[in-house]
Every structure is written in structure tokens, then in C-alpha cells.
Image (cartoon, grey):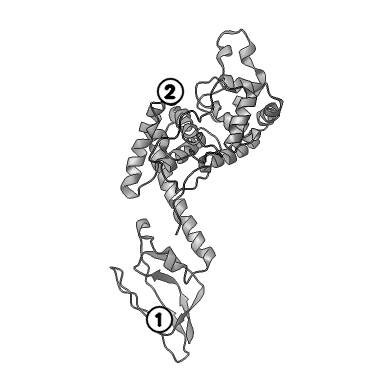
Amino acid sequence: MSHTVAVDRWVLSSGAFYFTSTSNFYFPAKFAPTPHFGANPIRASATTNGSNESVVCKSLICGRRALLSLATLSLVMPCDRVNNSSAAIAAEESLSFREEIRKVLSKGKAAGVLRLVFHDAGTFEIDDKIGGMNGSIVLELDRPENKGLKKSVKILEKAKSQIDVVQPVSWADIIALAGAEAVSLCGGPSIPIQLGRIDSMVPDPEGKLPEESLDATSLKQCFERKGFSTQELVALSGAHTLGSKGFGNPVVFDNAYFKILMEKPWLSSAGMTSMVGLPSDRALVEDDECVRWISKYAEDQSLFFEDFKNAYTKLVDTGATWKKSL
């Protein structure tokens, strides 16, 4: 026979988890443990005479590293409550990681960090099913296309070393988070990042990043092999609004990139304006399909922010290998 136990604060198993609930749960009458968690004992009582039963648990403070019993919790909690608890833990971890990244990141360093994201994640191709956001960039820094990225890795290494003291984190997660923080720091959209990527122990194959000299047709084909549409190609190219490529304020993330592309200043003979952008940037405005999106983003910064956020999330998730959840 089972009886209703009204739980206010319930601590399961070895004291690794706690939650607050007003739900009623049904346990066998003989379930009346007196668990110990290194503090005052928590006493539970049960009777078999039909009287009301209750479990009163004293308030406990459990550290974040003690949250280990989600599997046991799922036996007595509805699934949606377990999922919500998992999400809360992940959100807390993401916030603490971001705080450490902010300590080492500045607006002047944002463009380099964002470039690091693209060079780590940009190696993925659908047919090969290799590459993607896997932290292998730290093994590929001597390649010509990655010139200058050692500085960005050293910046993030400081944050990673602090985080690793509390909880080991992959390079892939750190780089994905840092790119999102770089965008936000410079006035761009806030981008949520899922954690749990696993680092590769070997470099990705060479020759998988889009070349700066590609024309629009070749760029679209390259991004299609990686699983990205023309719209996503154009939105992600908007990251070049940061840095020294000549698209507006180098430390402000906005839609100036698209406005300047539409002006085609490189066609002017007025000195340095001819140096604006990479050949691949200039190629975009020679393609009608790309121009449709460039025009939209030039007119509507909010649309660009939303599309960039979605494309960035896809970029750092595609091809990643994930830890198995509980």
C-alpha cells in the first residue's frame, strides 16, 4: 500500500541534488529513511494506519559540483521537471563560463576571437562528416590561413585555465561562447550557446576553409557543401563588420557591412576606399541572390541580428560531437 508524501525540500540518494516542489509523490509505506549528508540528519516518518504522512527536510546548501543524481531524480520527478533542472544547471555553467571570458575579452580583441570561431567551425562538410566546431584549431595554428590566431587562442587560454580549475571545459565550447560574447560586447545580438562539445585530438584536414578569392558562385557552392544556404552565407559574412576590413566602426557590430557593400567603394579611385573588404566580400554584390539579402540587411539591422544569431548557432553546432546527457 502507498501513501502520499508531501515534499517541501527533498534530497535524494547521497545528497547530490535538491529541488523545491509542492507536488505530491507516492512512496511505499516502508520508505522512511533517515539520510545523512554531513549536516543535521533529515528525519522522515511513515505510518500504515492511513494517517497523513509528511517529510520535512531542513534547508541545505548544495554546491554546483554536487549535482550528480539526475538519473535517480527522474524516478520520482516528472520528466519535464528533470529537464528543467538540467537546463537550469546548463544555464548556470554557461553564465559562469561567459563571466570568465568577459574578463579577458575586449572590443579590440573581438574580431580576432570571432575569426577563431569561423576557422574552427568552417572546416565542416556534409559529405565528409568531419570538421566543424571541435577545438582542432588549437592544433592548426601554423597553417597559413590561420595566421594571427595564436593571439586569440592565448587570450582564451587564460579564461579556460580558470574554468578548468572548477570544471573542465572543451576548447570547442570556449571558442563558441567567446565568439558569441564578442558579438554581444560590440553591440550585436545576444546568442545562446549550448554546451557539451567534445574536442578533437587530431587536426582537421587542410583546404576546407572558404578561400578569400572565391567568386559568388563558388562561395555559394562551398557553403552549400557545409549545409548553409545563400541567406546564411550572407548573414555570416556580416561578421566582417568587426575588425580592420574597412566596414564602418571596427569595434561595433552593426549592419554597416551591408550598407557599405551596396555602395561599392572599391570602385572609387579615392585612395584607401579601394582597399575595403576581401575579394570574397566584393563578390557577394555581384550576385543577384546575394544582393537581395544584402539589401534587406542594409535596411533592417534587426533582421540581420536575428538571422546572424540563427546562422551562428547553426555554425557552432553543425558537425560538433556532443557529450552524452544523463
Residue designated by label 1: 31
Residue 19 vs residue 163: left or right? right
Q: What is the x, y in percent for residue 4?
A: 49, 81
In what element is the residue under mark 2?
Answer: helix
In the displayed structure, 147 sits above or below 36; it is: above
- Whether tag 2 and tag 1 are in contact, CB under 8 A, the answer is no
Residue designated by label 2: 144
Of badges 2 and 1, the one in the foreground is 2
Residue 106 vs residue 305: left or right? left
Count up the numbered dots.
2
Task: Identify the residue shown where x is 51% and y is 60%.
Answer: 84
Q: CA distance from mark 2 to mark 1?
A: 66 Å
Task: Identify the residue shown where x is 33% and y is 43%.
Answer: 162
Residue ranking furthest to the left: 38
Kind of residue indicated by mark 1: Phe
Residue 90 vs residue 38: left or right? right
Residue 324 visible in rendering? yes
Q: What is the x, y in percent for residue 219?
A: 60, 27
Answer with the quarter of the image where residue 70 lies: bottom left
Q: Nearer the viewer, residue 221 or 34?
A: 221
Residue 255 visible in rendering? no
Q: Residues within 10 Å of mark 1 (few under 14, many from 20)?
A: few
Task: Identify the residue shown where x is 58% and y is 32%.
Answer: 236
In the displayed structure, 27 sits above or below 10; it is: below
In what element is the residue under mark 1?
Answer: loop
Q: What is the x, y in percent for residue 260?
A: 62, 21
Residue ranking furthest to the bottom: 49
Q: Nearer the viewer, residue 217 or 152?
A: 217
Answer with the quarter of the image where residue 57 lies: bottom left
Kind of residue indicated by mark 2: Pro
In the displayed structure, 211 sits above or below 83; it is: above
The first of marks 2 and 1 along the sequence is: 1
